[in-house]
Amino acid sequence: MLRLYRNVKMQAFKNKYRTKTLRLQSWDYRWNGVYFITICCKDKAHYFGEINDDEMYLSPVGVIADVLWHEIKQHTNHIELDEFVVMPNHIHGILIINNSVETLHATSLQKTPKTMSVISPKANSISSIIRSYKSAVTKHAHRLGYEFSWQSRFYDHIIRNEASLNQIQHYVINNPQSWKDDKFYPQD
């Protein structure tokens, strides 16, 4: 019965309200790898603090975002954290998935019908880790009475070599000093 309902629903809307994924379709985001993550605040609002004299000063919500990022490794045992920065309206971080047992690539690439279990973020994937992080920051900010909300999606980039990793690490570390040149800097 549930399958019939899903089929009727999918036919009725013809995927009209389904947004295209930003994720690389040939990649399983549970695979070992190094991932550069950017998450923005809703409407690029400056919830996390401000930059003065090239230094980031965290607001209470910025402190929550910072602390909970560093807690990710306490909740996901196959994650390593690399460079990370909280900016006034977004965060940048590098996550490293290092499973001792790799996901079977062949099973991940099989064509299957688009049921909710297939399109939902998989356990221990970048999407599920970021979803949990965003949820925790929002929950704690609201519990403490702070206005806050995230942009609905996040950006990821799979880092494929040492040179790219070094360049992105440099970018993350120096992001507060480059704030006025940042694409997320408010344009008057």
Image (cartoon, helix red, strand yellow):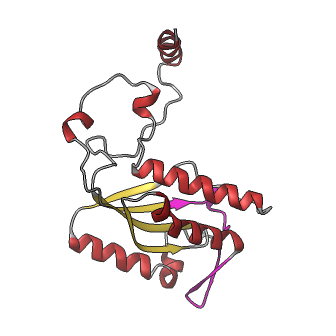
Question: Residue 5 at what x, y percent from top left?
Answer: 53, 12
- The residue range painted magenta reads 39-58
Front residue (pair 148, 145) = 145
Residue at the spot x=77%, y=63% of the render?
Answer: 144
Residue at the spot x=48%, y=81% of the render?
Answer: 178
Residue at the spot x=37%, y=46% of the render?
Answer: 23
Q: From this viewpoint, which residue is outermost toward the right? A: 145
Front residue (pair 36, 101) = 101
Question: Residue 134 at what x, y percent from top left?
Answer: 57, 55
Q: Is residue 43 visible?
A: no
Picture layout, residue 100 above or below residue 26: below
| The quadrant where residue 172 appears | bottom left
Answer left or right for 7 relative to 111.
Answer: right
Residue at the spot x=55%, y=57% of the render?
Answer: 133
Answer left or right for 72 relative to 170.
Answer: right
In the image, is residue 188 part of the stretch drawn in magenta?
A: no
Question: Residue 109 at what x, y percent from top left?
Answer: 24, 35
Q: Is residue 32 visible?
A: yes
Question: Residue 30 at what x, y percent from top left?
Answer: 33, 49
